[in-house]
């Protein structure tokens, strides 16, 4: 076996933060934290390697000198501990209103996953997205006016439409309240019918010049929001294809958002 030195492209203060919250979690939950197979530093490094480079768990277990089962347990624990620090939707919207944002943008993204055998009552593959022609989970991403991601939703199966996912998660109700406070939401045509406060381009052909102008303005204003999903998926390569249970995608995305904010705060 050949050994070599490697560098993890993550700021040191991010590792320190993750190690600190993992240590606090161990003190709360473990009766004998000193009997753990790996230290909080090793566990934090494992989790960050998985997020940053998508390193497979077998390699993480080998490098940490622990069993693969323990590595999976530590990874899931780390995801949950980090995700617990994700911002709340209502808090994010209130801070946006206080900061004087003109609008926020809502967009859905499919986070690819391995094939899942879960079927609906009608026999359809629940996690298969016909739009993207691949398996994955639907996550709703909210951004500030510059297109920086500020909040992510729980996961919905890939077969769920963006508007349906927004309704199920209670997102639209919070957005209506924000619109009443003077901060509307911009979205694409997939959210047509979302209701008052959520502005989408008008569908159809041969539209009048005023409607075409409105569509152009909306598209230009929400264009920066397209970078939000790219920021999450390119910075944290684990999001490019999840090999864990697809129901874990929501927690994984929330943890990735926390890690992203540590490196480039939204405020």
Image (cartoon, rainbow, N blue to C red):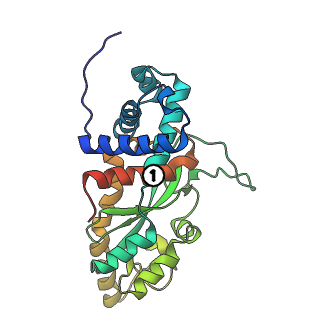
Q: From the viewer's perspective, is 135 left or right of 99?
A: right
Q: Nearer the viewer, residue 104 or 97?
A: 97
User: How many other residues sit within 10 Å of disc 1, few (<14), some (14-19) or many (≥20)?
Assistant: many
- Regarding residue 11, the answer to whether it shows in the image is no
- Regarding residue 257, the answer to whether it shows in the image is yes
Circle 1 sits in a helix, a strand or a loop, which is it? helix
Q: Position of residue 4 (x, y in %)?
A: 26, 17
Give the residue drawn at x 49%, y 35%. 74
Q: Position of residue 227 (x, y in %)?
A: 30, 59
Q: Position of residue 35 (x, y in %)?
A: 51, 26
Quadrant into which the N terminus falls: top left
Examine the rendered structure and indicate whether residue 1 appears above or below residue 77: above
Q: Nearer the viewer, residue 29 or 56?
A: 29
Give the residue drawn at x 59%, y 68%. 168
Q: Examine the image and state in which quarter residue 183 appears.
A: bottom left
- Residue occupied by mark 1: 83
Q: Nearer the viewer, residue 172 or 88?
A: 88
Give the residue drawn at x 25%, y 38%. 9
Give the residue drawn at x 29%, y 84%. 213
Q: Position of residue 228 (x, y in %)?
A: 33, 59
Q: Residue furthest top?
A: 1
Q: How many marks?
A: 1
Q: From the viewer's perspective, is 230 left or right of 30?
A: left
Q: From the viewer's perspective, is 130 left or right of 43?
A: right
Quadrant into which the C terminus falls: bottom left
Q: Examine the image and state in which quarter residue 117 appears.
A: top right
Examine the rendered structure and indicate whether residue 63 appears above or below residue 191: above
Q: Nearer the viewer, residue 90 or 179?
A: 90
């Amino acid at each position: 076996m050949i050994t070599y030195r490697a560098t993890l492209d993550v700021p040191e203060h991010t590792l320190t933060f993750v190690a600190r919250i993992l240590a606090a979690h161990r003190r709360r939950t473990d009766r004998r934290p000193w009997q753990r197979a790996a230290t909080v530093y090793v566990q934090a490094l494992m989790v960050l390697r998985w997020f940053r480079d998508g390193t497979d768990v077998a390699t993480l277990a080998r490098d940490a000198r622990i069993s693969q089962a323990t590595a999976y347990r530590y990874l899931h624990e780390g995801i949950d501990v980090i995700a617990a620090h994700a911002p709340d939707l209502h808090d994010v919207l209130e801070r946006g209103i206080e900061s004087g944002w003109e609008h926020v943008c809502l967009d859905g993204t499919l986070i690819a996953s391995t094939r899942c055998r879960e079927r609906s009552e009608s026999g359809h593959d629940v996690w298969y997205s016909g739009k993207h022609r691949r398996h994955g989970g639907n996550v709703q991403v909210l951004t500030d006016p510059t297109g920086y991601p500020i909040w992510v939703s729980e996961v919905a199966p890939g077969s769920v439409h963006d508007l349906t996912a927004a309704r199920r998660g209670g997102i639209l109700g919070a957005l209506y309240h924000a619109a009443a406070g003077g901060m509307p939401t911009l979205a694409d045509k997939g959210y047509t019918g979302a209701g008052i406060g959520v502005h989408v381009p008008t569908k159809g052909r041969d539209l009048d010049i005023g409607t075409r102008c409105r569509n152009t303005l909306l598209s230009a204003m929400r264009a920066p929001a397209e970078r939000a999903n790219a920021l999450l998926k390119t910075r944290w390569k684990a999001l490019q294809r999840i090999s864990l249970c697809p129901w874990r995608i929501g927690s994984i995305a929330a943890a990735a958002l926390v890690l992203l904010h540590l490196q480039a705060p939204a405020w």
